[in-house]
Image: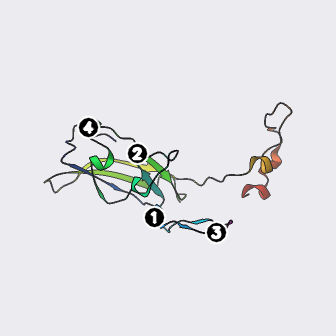
């Protein structure tokens, strides 16, 4: 995101989206179901990349006013990268919307800044050694091995 000429000392930002609150995740000792996600919510916006350690304070809550400094924006640093994480698969392509508005101090009507539509999808990780294709002598995958996609291996 970018300040694009807005005064960081008088500008606030608000994100509207169907968030999955990470504070509502329930952890258990059950190895078959170690986490339970909160109902509803499809997305999370973060101020840090998932490759780094994130805290709950790095989560951008929906419908909450953030000052430019809350987001790491200032006159000397007018741009900030945010990360969008898909949590639950969408029911239709592009049906998850993120809207960013801005409000200037003393002005009642928010400024519309941007909107995007996205499609979070389901990703299933499988054990490639147990369920992957056969491996050729040179270490490459045997693409002729169609059995590794058999129905009994898809949800492993």
| Residue extent of the magenta highlight | 28-33
What element does badge 2 sit on?
loop
Distance from disc 4 to disc 3, alpha carbons, whole Å, reads 48 Å
Distance from disc 2 to disc 1, alpha carbons, whole Å, reads 19 Å
* Callout 2–callout 1 Cβ contact below 8 Å: no
> Which of disc 3 and disc 4 is earlier in sequence?
4
Residue holding disc 4: 4
> Which of disc 1 and disc 3 is earlier in sequence?
1
> Which of disc 2 and disc 3 is earlier in sequence?
3
Percent from the top left, x then y, of residue 4?
A: 26, 37
Main SS of the magenta segment?
A: loop
Residue holding disc 1: 23
Dot 4 crowding, Cα within 10 Å, few <14, some 14–19, many 20+: few
- Which mark, by number, is residue 29? 3
Residue holding disc 2: 82
Residue drawn at (65%, 54%) of the image: 124
Hey, which residue is sitting farthest right in the picture?
Answer: 137
């Amino acid at each position: 995101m970018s300040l694009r000429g807005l005064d960081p000392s008088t500008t606030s930002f608000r994100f509207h989206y169907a968030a999955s609150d990470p504070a509502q995740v329930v952890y258990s000792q059950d190895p078959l179901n170690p986490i339970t996600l909160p109902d509803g919510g499809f997305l999370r916006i973060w101020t840090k990349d998932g490759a780094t350690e994130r805290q709950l304070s790095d989560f951008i809550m929906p419908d909450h006013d953030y000052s430019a400094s809350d987001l790491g924006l200032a006159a000397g640093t007018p741009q900030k990268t945010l990360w969008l994480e898909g949590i639950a698969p969408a029911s239709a392509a592009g049906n998850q919307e993120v809207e960013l508005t801005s409000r200037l101090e003393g002005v009642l009507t928010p400024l519309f800044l941007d909107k995007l539509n996205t499609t979070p999808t389901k990703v299933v990780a499988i054990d490639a050694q147990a369920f992957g294709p056969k491996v050729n002598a040179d270490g490459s995958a045997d693409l002729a091995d169609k059995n590794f996609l058999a129905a009994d291996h898809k949800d492993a």
